[in-house]
Image (cartoon, coloured by chain):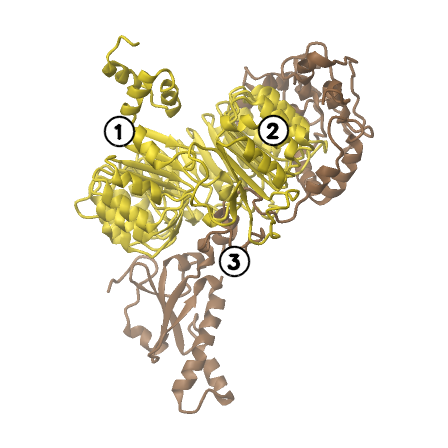
Amino acid sequence: MEGSAGNHEVCPQFLDFVPKEREWLVNRDGQRRHGPSEEKELELRLGPPGNQDWSMRDSARKNPGDKSESLLSLGYFSSMSSMTQNISNGSQTQMFSASKNPVGAVISSSCSSSAYGYRGKTQHNQQQTKVPSFLQLNSPLQGLPVMTQEASQRCCTEAVDIQSAEKKAFSPSSATTAVPNSSQKRTAPGPVVGWPPVRSFRKNLASSSSSKPAPVSQNGVPDKVTSRTPVETCRKGLFVKINMDGLPIGRKVDLKAYDSYEKLSSAVDELFRGLIAAQKDSCPAGIQNKQEEEKALTGLLDSSGEYTLVYEDNEGDRMLVGDVPWHMFISTVKRLRVLKRSELSALSLGSSKQEKVRH
Amino acid sequence: MNYFPDEVLEHVFDFLTSHRDRNAVSLVCSLWYRVERFSRQRVFIGNCYAISPEKLIKRFPGLKSLTLKGKHHFADFNLVPYDWGGYVQPWIEALAKSRIGLEELRLKRMVVSDESLELLSRSFANFKALVLVSCEGFTTDGLAAIAANCRFLRELDLQENEIDDHSGHWLSCFPDSCTSLTSLNFACLKGEINSASLERLVARSPNLRSLRLNRSVPLETLQKILVQAPLLVDLGTGSYVHDPDSETYNKLKTTILTCKSIRNLSGFLEVDPRCLPAIFPICLNLTYLNLSYAAGIHGSELIKLIRRCAKLQRLWILDCIGDKGLEVVASTCNELQELRVFPSDPLGIGHDAVTEYGLVAISIGCPKLHSLLYFCQQMTNAALITVARNCPNFIRFRLCILDPTKPDAVTMQPLDDGFGAIVQSCKFLRRLSLTGLLTDQVFRYIGMYAEQLEMLSVAFAGNSDKGMLYVLNGCKKLRKLEIMDCPFGNGALLSDAGKYETMRSLWMSSCEITLSGCKTLAKMMPRLNVEIINEHDQMEICPEDDGQRVGKLYLYRTLVGPRKDAPEFVWNL
């Protein structure tokens, strides 16, 4: 391990991480340390650098025209300042006035060098030398909020290409590390058991809160491995009884399978169509009856059809279906009923807002 | 100290609350060992297979409160088969047979059956507190037994368990004479409960300070409960959905104004954001806010809410808050100590996700931050270095980039230096999780700088055995090491076998270790249990083929040898 060509590379290793095709200028102080002073090599200089003065110019990677020498942390601030314009001024000062924080101090001193129209004092960059060397790493800072999104998109889509490219870039230079082949094995895994490291119920949170049906677990976990019971509530249906006037036998519908009143209405129509036909006359539901049935069950939600759809909510009141937003309906509905319109007035219906007549 | 009578020693030891301190004093001399063991009331066992119940009972006859942990942490991510083990039944049986007056039982990742709960409820007259975290194997029938039989029950706390819900009636099993409840948390239950029972229970529990409802409890019930329990300190809402123009909602708004003691707020599994204004008045008092299940609240509404929570110390949130939202957190919540940002869309790439910007903002605005769990889309070395500088007080730093081998998003380099900065700057760091493109170098930094590190979680990192060796050699206080999908092989595994006796456990899955390496290790170290877990759906593992790679290795130190309840697919070498 010691014999390998890696030890002296720690300081220069940082430098070596900079691919040559970039325009970053790097000051090699030429100090190569060996052997027992390895600890010093590994010293990550978070404090003010002794004799190292790394000045790196801005990278041309994303914004070829950007030549600012501002600090990375400055970059964060500048992007944040544009993003936080709407936040009260107090909070902005807060970010700067962290006096114990050298990052903050640097901000105030070198604002002016920023090309981003940053508000700040016009002190010069002299204070930069006090800044920890790492913070002088530059990155394209202009329009950073936008950049991030681009970056993330690019990173995501080009990850594989970039990775193979940068492997070539740093395998010759970082000699301590083994050939990237082994890391290649591990890159960009497909659905891996145990990844990401979140509990199962978190994997379906987003879908369970919306009305969409939950996705099947995609992480390839074999059924034996997961717990016996289905994990997420969203997978369980919301089954409520639905009865229809004149029919002695009711049905059950899974409300979670629908995301709108229209879909529910057509589902109810389908459910009862056959039953109505069977009951209407002795002949089986045939084509000649179809049109009648269709007429019978359309217009459930408006005043047009022969039937109307009502529900009983969690307070025991009978309510007309369709008044409240779908998700609210879902959360309060306990059972459904298809009534003949002529019977509506005969019942006392609760109003959705103020008056509630309790049975 | 030998001149003091035992009672004095005991009195002094009473001031030692941490189990580590008490473990330490018991090692001083046999006198101290004796005094300590008779006076010990609370025992923590980090691995239920490290010791037997009989030995525990023998040593600590005065035991009142027991904490047990079963399965390995990676069981949370479906890496440990359901019937691997971790049964609490033998413990309860042994305790029931003894004369131990158990009052509190806290279990994590254990298999608990209804029989166990029933036995527990009947065996200890003074039983007061049951806390189950990430457990499974029981149903609401078991809860009914606890409710019915534990006459002095104060605390029933169910966190993230898998419970078969047979619905409704267990709450009604609390007898009318039960008025001692201080804490009730059933948020993880999926079924319906009887609202009237719940309301009556709350009405007769004047000491109730913590109540976390499940998603079936409607807003109307919440309002009625709050009327009965205005002194609540910790509230988890049920279904937080209602028509904001309704009378119920207006009543809720008024009621909440009387709840001046609420400091912790969670729940919101179902939420209509239009109802959020009702809680605005109490936001300023909140020190803990958990919105990590509230996928129904979008970024802008989250921000509106958080702007009012200036005193937050702990915040659990979903990444739909976005970097912008985190900036709001940074500017508002300057007292923040713990932040957890969970992925709202773990299997996809979300538009509102967070990046390194959010983290840097937090590090600037929240100097007291010491615990972090951060799921993000990308990270950079520069950001980590900045964070390390701004927040040198990290105790727990867990970073999870959803694409686990992603390099620095700007420079495309490994994230070695960033994490190196973290471990160098944060001298009190006890727990660390790494992701991103990482080489052996990051482990070198960890070995060098992370002197207080006790738990390290690694996935898809490193290039060679050296990585693992750096850690094993360098981190003197390491207790738990968990590794998945890293190229570490037998060389690393066997280099310092004695180290594993100083640790609680080692987990390695999908690495380069082979059966022969594990066998060798098991032979060298008789006081370790070296378990190989073979999945059924993997290729049949031939016990003779030593050269084959081991899918999952879990080894842990133990005083009681190989366990007898291991299923077939677990080999103890």
Residue shown at the point (39%, 57%) measured from the top left: A331
Chain seen in yellow: B
Residue A136 appears in the picture as rendered:
yes
Give the quarter of the image for residue B384.
top right
Work out whether disc 3 and disc 2 sit on a shared chain.
Answer: yes
Residue shown at the point (48%, 39%) measured from the top left: B72
Rendered image: mark on residue A212:
3
Tally the marks. Answer: 3
Q: Secondary structure at mark 1?
A: loop
Residue B204 appears at what percent x and percent y? 20, 43
Q: Secondary structure at mark 2?
A: helix
Q: Which residue is mark 1?
A: B62
Q: Which residue is mark 2?
A: A81
Q: Colour of chain A?
A: brown
The chain to which mark 3 is attached is A
Looking at the image, tell me whether mark 3 or mark 2 is earlier in sequence order: 2
